[in-house]
Image (spheres, rainbow, N blue to C red):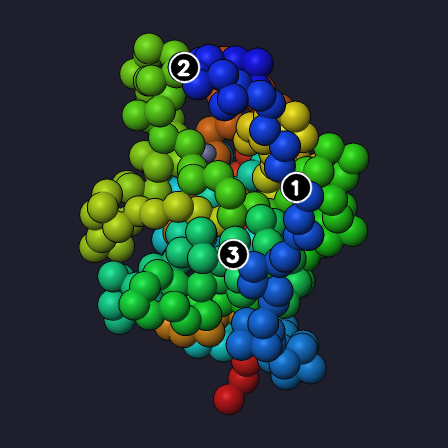
Amino acid sequence: MDNQIPSLCPRLNKPRKFPKKPVTICYNKAAAVQVDRTAYDKARHDALLGDVIEKITVPKKSAKTWKMLKGDLCRVTVVEGSQVGDMNFWNLHNPKERFYSGKTRQLHASHLTTYDRLWSNMPYVRPMATVIADSLSRYGIDEDGASVHDVIGTRCDSYTIELITGKKSHDSCHTYLTRAAQDAGLTEDDVHDVWNIFMCTGFTKDTHQYFCKASPARKGDYIEFIADMDLIVGLSACPHGDVSVPVGLEVPDEICHPLGVEIFRKKN
Ligand SMILES: [Zn+2]
């Protein structure tokens, strides 16, 4: 490589050739991470024909938490304009068990869609929820390698925003999720890396840098998941709105919107 420091040994200054090797998928959607699709489709059907037990609006630039029991279905909807959301998941009975975005990324992919699952941290490593419907599933992987609903990004936070801009900010998903977590009896330490719903992200082909583009979600788009255990769920309506403005620049209020949440429970 041209930018390497020359070695004192001339033999080592020759460019090194790396032989091509085949790609191996590390965790190729093993049987253990796949769901019985027929059973989950039926669970969706039953839940949607049941009762709406809770309806929540997460106002723009804020976060809320709610509880779900195993088998409940949650639908998050873009109710006004394009808007991304950052989600956290905790075991209702033991918040030390929480969503593990990195392991979910390994087990499924960098972007989740129908029948992918959200996994918990070690030592538990259990499915917390299963995605059961996604109105953006046809977006697929675009020409830049981007897709939606990623488990790559960690959440926007005031600490990194200050690092980048030098300015203090109190508007971030981490701040909002912390406040919402505190309302649920949790602390800032319990807030963790998120599932970025409706967000369109990828890595650049040349430098592998994380990028985002304006969300393709529009009013009426939704994503649904079924709880695989009793849960506390947190959702932040990101202060970057549809993420059409790069982090660090002023975000116009008009690109920020609320998100709608409905919880369905099947009739007994
Ligand atoms: Zn955010």
Element assignment for label 2:
loop
Return the disc, 2 or 3, that comes first in the chain's sequence: 2
Res. 8 mark: 2
Q: Is residue 185 visible?
A: yes
Circle 3 packing at 10 Å, graded few (<14), some (14-19), many (20+), is: some
Element assignment for label 1:
loop
Q: Where is residue 37? Give x, y as percent.
A: 67, 77
| In front: label 2 or label 1 | 2
Q: How many marks?
A: 3
Return the disc, 2 or 1, that comes first in the chain's sequence: 2
Q: Amino acid at mark 1?
A: Pro
In the image, 162 versus 108, the foreground residue is 108
Identify whether 53 is placed above or below 247. below
Circle 1 packing at 10 Å, graded few (<14), some (14-19), many (20+), is: few
**Which residue is tagged 1?**
19
At horizontal 39% and vertical 63% (from top left) the residue drawn is 120
Q: CA distance from mark 2 to mark 3?
A: 41 Å
Q: Amino acid at mark 2?
A: Leu
Q: CA distance from mark 3 to mark 1?
A: 25 Å
Quadrant the N terminus occupies: top right
Res. 106 mark: 3
Left or right, 247 with reference to 143: left
Res. 94 mark: none
Q: Where is residue 152? Give x, y as percent.
A: 51, 43
Q: Is mark 2 within 8 Å of ligand 1?
A: no
Q: Is mark 3 within 8 Å of ligand 1?
A: no
